Amino acid sequence: MALEMKPVCERCATALGPDAEAFICSYECTFCPDCTSVMKHVCPNCGGALVARPPRHSDLNADE
């Protein structure tokens, strides 16, 4: 099961490409760096920690 790479921040709707810096919780809620900072790295949905989402480089997306 692959990580779902959500395309936008759930708080401000900023576009987040597959190789963009983003933060996720264990439920894959996804936020941009600015919103993550404002929320002090805590997911507003589950209360879990927001950690750096690993990038998925565009040259690997050809088969998706």
Image (cartoon, rainbow, N blue to C red):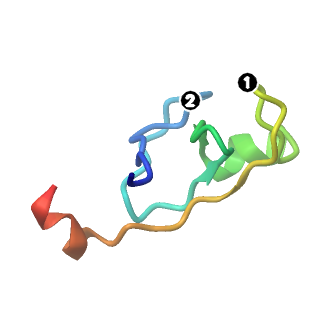
Left or right of residue 5, residue 38 in this image: right
Q: In this view, does 62 lie to the left or right of 9?
A: left
Residue at image x 12%, y 65%?
A: 62
Looking at the rendered image, the disc whose residue lies closer to the viewer, 1 or 2, is 1
The percent coordinates of residue 12 (x first, y second) are 58, 29
Among numbered discs 1 and 2, the one appearing first in the sequence: 2
Label 2: which secondary element: loop
Q: Which amino acid does label 1 sit on?
A: Asn
Q: Quadrant of the C terminus?
A: bottom left
Q: Where on the picture, by quarter, is residue 15?
A: top left
Residue placed farthest to the top in the image? 45
5, 15: nearer the viewer: 5
Residue wearing tag 2: 10
Looking at the image, residue 61 lies above or below residue 38: below
* 15 in relation to 46, above or below: below
Counting from the top left corner in percent of width and height, residue 3 is at 44, 52
Which residue is the extreme one toward the front? 1
Q: What residue type is labelled 2?
A: Glu
- The residue identified by callout 1 is 45
Q: Residue at (60%, 46%) from the top-left corner? A: 32
